[in-house]
Image (spheres, helix red, strand yellow):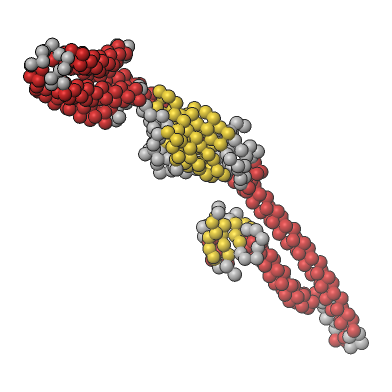
Amino acid sequence: MNWFVINENEHLGPFEEEVLKQLFKSGDLKGGALVWKEGMSDPKPFSEVFLKQDAKKDTNENLDKNLEQGLDEEDEDDEDELPPELPPEALKPRPEKKERAKSSAREVKLEVYEEDKQNKQKQSFWSTLKFALASVGIIGIVGFSWMYYSTHFKTFSRPSKMGYNDFERLKQASVFRGDKTNLAFSLAKDKSKVWMATNVPYTGEVVLKLSSVPDKILANDSVVLTAKGELKGRLAEFDSFEFERGQRIIEGWYQVEAVTPRRLEVPIAAKLLSSRNRQFRYIDEILLTTMEKSAFDQALKQFALKQNQNDSVFWEELKQKYETIKAMAGQIHASMKMIFQSNGRDWSQRVDMFEQEYTQNYGAFFTNFVIENEKAYEDLKEKDFNDKLEVISNYTRLTRLAKQVGLATMDSLDELRRLKEPEGPANRNALRKKIDARFEKMLEIAEEKLRLMQTK
């Protein structure tokens, strides 16, 4: 019949009985190794199954051999131990004495042999019983030691993308023997996974939620995500993220919440040697980075310094552009006012002169200004600022104001052309007030932005 060797959670085999015995004799199979065949309710140690059978077999063979030898020796002893022969004359009258003597000796020898056989059987029984009890005791000690080791000291292997320092840190957390539930977290080298190690020797689902701490990650973007993982062998792996904010994990400090939605399963060894809660909710602030903490602290300082530098450069450039727009709008408005100082005869000539001046000095400028601002806007989205939203919104307003100045100029020019032959001062004054209001509003917007930038 085929036998199987139980190695942790694997069945090795099948093996013939003689093969297992050869492996045991060569030292490749230990006496405590668990073996099993079809029909057995549970695996048993090799020594208990085979050594006990061999011992019993040897005992029976020895008993049979001793019995045969005893009977042979009995015949020989019968001849050796008979009294010396009587003289010829004594044999004739009393032949029955020799037969009675031989029969008595044989009966005595048989009784002694039977008693000796019974004693040997008893000794063999007690020797076998002692061996079995010793084997069971050894197996029990080994099994208990294994369960204690697996529950308190056995830990996981290092995943391929986990750094060595992180592995040592998480391994220490997993063998923490205090009463408190202990957790530690690590980020993969390529930031594609997050691991959680714990001293809880149970198995089951764990839900992880991470929220970035403001001003403590290496980006201005906030990150909020949820992930699910399976806790097994004191380690849970999370590699499928649902982002509520952001699109990737950024190195930095996070508010973490780890929750077991259901009661964890308890392995057999942990049932005997551990009594931890089968559900937990863990909240803490953790650092997720591939760097050492000191290196991350330095990187965070450099990031903040770079943000401040980017902010300073941005606000200075924005201030200069607003001043340029304000000056351009003022010059255009002043040129339009000159048109209203003309009389009716040279009105058309003044309008033509203004259009030529605008085309040469301002038209191309506003077109290029808007195009360059839109390119700069795309570059700004890739840079880090203390408040990127404020930066982008200000650049958007600047582009909008430049477009408004250009459109307002063209609308005013069309209205001036329609008024080639003014019918009277009233019409001219109405158009002048309309154009003045239009440009004064844009100049006020520019002035307000410049005042606000003085505080940056």
Q: In this view, does 229 lie above or below 13?
A: above
- Number of numbered discs: 0
Task: Report the side of 455 relative to 346 (left or right).
Answer: right
Q: Residue at x 66, y 49 (%)?
A: 140
Q: Which residue is rendered at x = 65% and y = 44% of the image? A: 271
Residue name at image x 48 percent, y 37 percent: 226
* Furthest residue toward front: 423
Query: In front here: 229 or 125?
Result: 229
Q: Is residue 64 visible?
A: yes
Image quarter of residue 90: bottom right
> In x, y percent, where is residue 248?
39, 36
Q: Residue at x 83, y 76 (%)?
A: 106
Answer above or below: position of 442 versus 125.
above
Name of the residue lying farthest toward the bottom: 92
Asked which quadrant contains residue 303, the reply is top left
Q: In the rendering, at what x and y percent does residue 399 appear?
A: 25, 25
Q: Is residue 218 visible?
A: no
Is residue 105 rendered to the left or right of residue 62? Answer: right
Q: Which of 93 and 271 is in front in this view?
A: 271
Residue at the limit of the structure toward the right, as seen here: 93
Q: Which of 340 and 14 is in front in this view?
A: 340
268 with respect to 404 (left or right): right
Q: In which quarter of the image is the N terminus?
A: bottom right
Depth order, front residue of 192/404:
404
Quadrant (top left, top right, bottom left, bottom right) of the C terminus: top left
Q: Percent x, y for residue 408?
A: 22, 22
**Picture coordinates of residue 381, whole percent (x, y):** 30, 29
